[in-house]
Amino acid sequence: MTAQSNTSPLLAVRDLSICFDTRHGPLRAVDGITFDLAPGEILGMVGESGAGKSLTGTAITGLLERPGRIDRGEIRFEGQRIDNLPAEAMRRLRGRKIGAIFQDPLTSLNPLMTVGQQLIQTIRTHMNLSREAARRRAIEFLSEVGIPAPDARIDQYPHQFSGGMRQRVVIALALCAEPSLVIADEPTTALDVSIQAQILDLLKRMCREHGAAVILVTHDMGVIAETADRVAVMYSGRVVEIGPVEKVVRAPHHPYTKGLMQSIPRIGSNAERLTQIDGAMPRLTDLPEGCAFHPRCPRAFDACRAAKPAPVPVEGGAVACHLYQGEPA
Amino acid sequence: MTVASTSSTSASPSASPATSASGESLLSLRGLSKTFDLSPPLLNRMIERKGKSFLRAVDGLDIDIPRGTTFSLVGESGCGKSTVAKLVVGLHAATRGKIRFDGTDLTGLHASARGAYRQRIQMIFQDPYASLNPRWRVRDIIAEPLRSFSITSGRAEEQREVGRLLEMVGLSAQDGDKFPHQFSGGQRQRISIARAISSKPDFLVCDEPTSALDVSVQSQVLNLMRDLQAELGLTYLFISHDLAVVDFMSDYVGVMYLGRLVEAGPAQRIFEAPEHPYTRLLMDTVPDITMARRDRVPVTGEVPNPITPPPGCSFNPRCPLASDICRAQSPELVAREGGTRVACHAVTGADGSSGRPAGAAHSPGARARGVA
Ligand SMILES: Nc1ncnc2c1ncn2[C@@H]1O[C@H](COP(=O)(O)OP(=O)(O)OP(=O)(O)O)[C@@H](O)[C@H]1O
Ligand SMILES: Nc1ncnc2c1ncn2[C@@H]1O[C@H](COP(=O)(O)OP(=O)(O)OP(=O)(O)O)[C@@H](O)[C@H]1O
Ligand code: SF4
Ligand code: SF4
Ligand SMILES: [Mg+2]
Ligand SMILES: [Mg+2]
């Protein structure tokens, strides 16, 4: 929402909108998202399931499939527009400069090829390495993502790996060519905390040492708190709040963000029930007028039903909620 | 584990003391083991002069799950949790050991006889996308168990039931018309939950059922699962790496390390007074939203290779308390104060120390036979 003025951003997303063409007309799934990403920065992305986090990542990597399309806005990478690049140019960019870790680990792996074949292929497509060097690098990367006995495991097939191990292979595939932008969509969901820490460490190291930037989509607020510099909160296709991670986690502004933070289960709370935000996110086919969160918002008032709140700056970030309209920056 | 695995594999059909004691266990695992053959094809082995290689994914598991309760398995990636889940629902055949469900040994059943249990035991898979048929509409995915177990009569009732199930998991009845790829990751996970509960099972195996959900939808789903349990008396085998979720859901917890149970017992006890060094480490690495531990160090040491596990206690290369006996002898599960079982020489004093009784006097060497 707020542009960072000093450093030139690695990635600039402006008013990005994505819709699906259906028999009943276009459905807007992502509605005017704007943010910047500086080199070396980790932007966390959280929000309601179905809010459009994965679609945003898919659009940036140029993998949006029909009937989905970008119908407004633009995406710039290293200053160059990439949302309208020809498929072949985009394919080269992806993998070499933009690495993507998708939410479904199994669907990004080829079940008929060994883990090693897939890694070596990816490495050799993007880097000028001999077979043996590529294999060594592949083993190195498997060990970086915490696969025990990588030199034995490299010749196995994906189905011989556990769920979390497959997820880590996908991570190794996305990172092995050292891209400068990584879109990581729920990269650590199926991983236990210690492996998780190891993966997050690897991501942080890539940022620190190679100036890579990461968009980290996750629902795990602990991961966000430990890893991200800034965090964007999405609800129903929009960024409702964005800001430095400690601000958003400790002192959220938006009522949805507040509800989200309260829903985090905690060890030892002995709760009979977990706090939840009652109701469900609106369907794309019947989005409410005004603020999409108003049917569930404990603080909704008349203005909320009438007009969509525009983002306004607050303490180093921005929030889109009528409660904060007019507050001085 | 080793104790009872030997006794149960030597085929004594009534070797389930916990079951007979309480008479309530819906599921009992005895000495359950699964070994995968990872050997390359014979020809390659001859050319490369390699031997056969095996991986013990699950090794001598003893677990009892009383009816109407939740038993959670935790442990690091690759320790064998999903393999246990798949053994229980019959997707893998056990290499050794027994799976008793409501008094019947499922491992001894023919596939045809096992069919009757398919309705009663359902599973929510770790990978929601891979488990949904991409060419089916969501309506048919959820209706399939309704049809095959003749739960609804007639199309109208079926559609009503599908709509009700979709709404129960926070989707809407109209979503039934769509295909899986039209949903987000979390929405797909909810579809697989709706499908799993559609046949009204009494036992549900949930492998990371909420790992792709945002926290507020996760709360809704977990609250729903607890409500269903209270209403229908469901029993859960639950797998999650999120310890806060496990804490909320579980009556019992089993901690696995490299295919074996290292600590098990009442959830509250495990969370409040973990005894096994691995459980303690696990509890220590929980990420923290207060960011107090931003530079939290992961469990150190090499993750062991399950194909050639270290001798003795397989945790010994990473264990701060390891001593000579740990490198020589694998510790057995021993019953502890508070109803737990722990497999660790240092905890039970077998390493020559006085043991590490967690607050209370420990029962000396009593063999693990307790519930859960
Ligand atoms: N191919 C498609 N056709 C129609 N709608 C789609 C399609 N793909 C996604 N959508 C819809 O777009 C919305 C956003 O989906 P997206 O996958 O981006 O959500 P998300 O924020 O990543 O959610 P989650 O946390 O559950 O993964 C959802 O409502 C989804 O149903
Ligand atoms: N079909 C298979 N063939 C060979 N090895 C397998 C097979 N399935 C699982 N394994 C191996 O068995 C071990 C346990 O796998 P499992 O999937 O049970 O782990 P998990 O505890 O569920 O891990 P995660 O938390 O990563 O899902 C792993 O080392 C895995 O590689
Ligand atoms: S704009 Fe209104 S309805 Fe929307 S979040 Fe703010 S107070 Fe709630
Ligand atoms: S048996 Fe020894 S190595 Fe194993 S957990 Fe106990 S002290 Fe550590
Ligand atoms: Mg997603
Ligand atoms: Mg698993």
Image: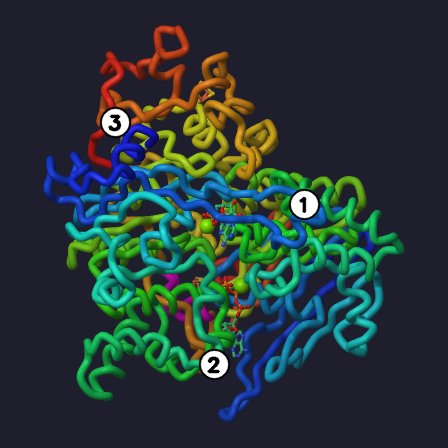
Q: Nearer the viewer, residue B208 or B54?
A: B54
Disc number lying in front (3 or 2): 3
Q: CA distance from mark 1 to mark 3?
A: 38 Å
What is the three-letter code of the residue carrying label 1? Leu
**Quarter of the image with the C terminus of chain B in it:** top left
Same subunit, tags 1 and 2? no
Decide: is B164 above or below B233. below
Regarding residue A293, the answer to whether it shows in the image is yes
| Disc 2: CA contacts within 10 A as few (<14), some (14-19) or many (>=20) | few
Q: CA distance from mark 1 to mark 2?
A: 34 Å
Q: Nearer the viewer, residue B96 or A96?
A: B96
Q: Position of residue B68 (x, y in %)?
A: 18, 49
Q: Residue at x 79, y 40 (%)?
A: A209
- For the rendered model, the colour scheme is rainbow
Question: What's the mark number on residue A119?
Answer: none
Q: Are marks 1 and 2 in contact (CB under 8 Å)?
A: no
Q: Is residue A262 left or right of residue A6?
A: left
In the picture provided, is A173 more to the left or to the right than B114?
Answer: right
Q: Position of residue A304 (x, y in %)?
A: 44, 69
Give the residue type that dot 2 points to: Arg
- The reply to the same-chain question for discs 1 and 3 is no
Q: Which residue is mark 2?
A: B135
Q: For the residue labelled by badge 2, is the local secondary structure a helix, a strand or a loop?
A: loop
Q: Which mark is residue A142?
A: 1
- N-term mark: 3 or 2: 2
Badge 1 sits on which subunit? Answer: A
* Disc 1 residue lies near ligand 2 with CB under 8 A: no
The residue wearing badge 3 is B368
Q: Can marks 3 and 2 be said to lie on one chain?
A: yes
Q: Secondary structure at mark 1?
A: helix
Residue range (magenta): A292-304
Left or right of B171, for residue A124: right
